[in-house]
Image: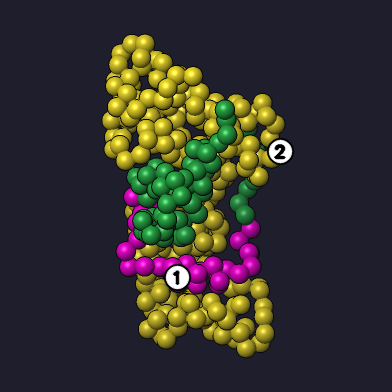
Amino acid sequence: MLLSRQGNPPPSQPNLIQKLLRMLALTRERELTCDEVFDLMDYYTELEQAGENVQALMPQVAHHLQICPECREECEALLAVLTANVS
Amino acid sequence: MAPERTNEQWISDLSDDGAARDAAIQYLITWLERRLFFYLRERSDLARVNADELHQMAADFAQDSVLIIIEKYAQFAGRSKFTTWAAKIAVHQALGEMRRARWRDLSLDELTQNGSFEPRFLSSDQRSPETEAIQKQVMAIVMDVMQRDLSERQRLALYSRLVLGVPIAILAEQMQTNTNALYKLIHDGRKRLKERLLEKGISPEEVLSTFR
Ligand SMILES: [Zn+2]
């Protein structure tokens, strides 16, 4: 694998309180886990691709994507892969 | 180009023990490889990787993913197109491998080596004296609640995710658990933290507004 090592990002980022508070503001009693979101991600992304209002149709998935950077990244990647202009 | 397979054709071709299966697998590898290449090429963190290397990465990811897809296609629930489901597996596999490569030197032991782990969240981002005072006060309460009401594992997990940005799968491995259990551990920690703040009359939304 040809990936370069980038090391761990430094822990002293600015705005950490903001990050934490934003996370707490988004925190809900019931949340889907990453595994639950993964199960629905193909369906969710197809709806998004079709221009549907995914926030309204699958609010719990949309909410998890606001909280979880990895699932968000995977969802964006999936959309990019599906819409790739490879002809 | 041959017409697209329906979901049923995908399953029946992959269940075949002859040429239909080989053709389906080959189609899938090529289909994924081309799309993964397109995606990798657009990633800013891979901007310095040349096209040959990106092609090789895409080929490796496609191969690895198809092995997983062959193993798991019986679990395909049919909620989406089969290729969308396959692409989901491939993206998960590719990004998982890239994250593992990026974080391979992570050691949580360094964080906890002085016995007990004490996270530091204080921001250096200073505004007016009043907002600074409010934020300092809130931070003091947050730190206090973290120490009193969260377990050491919850503190470590929250800090690693939020401050260091450790991906959940990597952190789960390091903490010898799975992503599902780890998500719940962090979620419980967030809920407890929010609850305690609200009890003290502090709403995260309101404090956030003092930052703007
Ligand atoms: Zn997630």
- Counting from the top left corner in percent of width and height, residue B158 is at 46, 62
Q: Are the residues flagged by discs 2 and 1 in contact, CB closer than 8 Å?
A: no
Q: Residue at x 44, y 25 (%)?
A: B28
Q: Residue at x 42, y 36 (%)?
A: B84
Q: Is residue B15 above or below residue A19?
A: above
Report the side of B136 relative to B73 (left or right): right
| Cα–Cα span, label 2 and label 1 | 37 Å
Q: Which chain is yellow?
A: B
- Counting from the top left corner in percent of width and height, residue A60 is at 36, 58
Q: How many marks?
A: 2
Q: Nearest the camera: B78 or A38?
A: B78
Q: Is residue B208 above or below residue B41?
A: below
Q: Which residues are magenta?
A: A10-36
Q: Residue at x 60, y 61 (%)?
A: A11
Report the side of B207 relative to B75 (left or right): right
Subunit that carries the residue with mark 1: A
Do discs 2 and 1 belong to a common subunit?
no
**Residue labelled with disc 2:** B48
Q: Nearest the camera: B107 or B101?
A: B101
The amino acid pointed to by label 2 is Arg
- Counting from the top left corner in percent of width and height, residue B190 is at 40, 68
Q: Quadrant of residue B77?
A: top left
Subunit that carries the residue with mark 2: B
**Residue labelled with disc 1:** A24
- Counting from the top left corner in percent of width and height, residue B172 is at 42, 50
Colour of chain A in the image: green
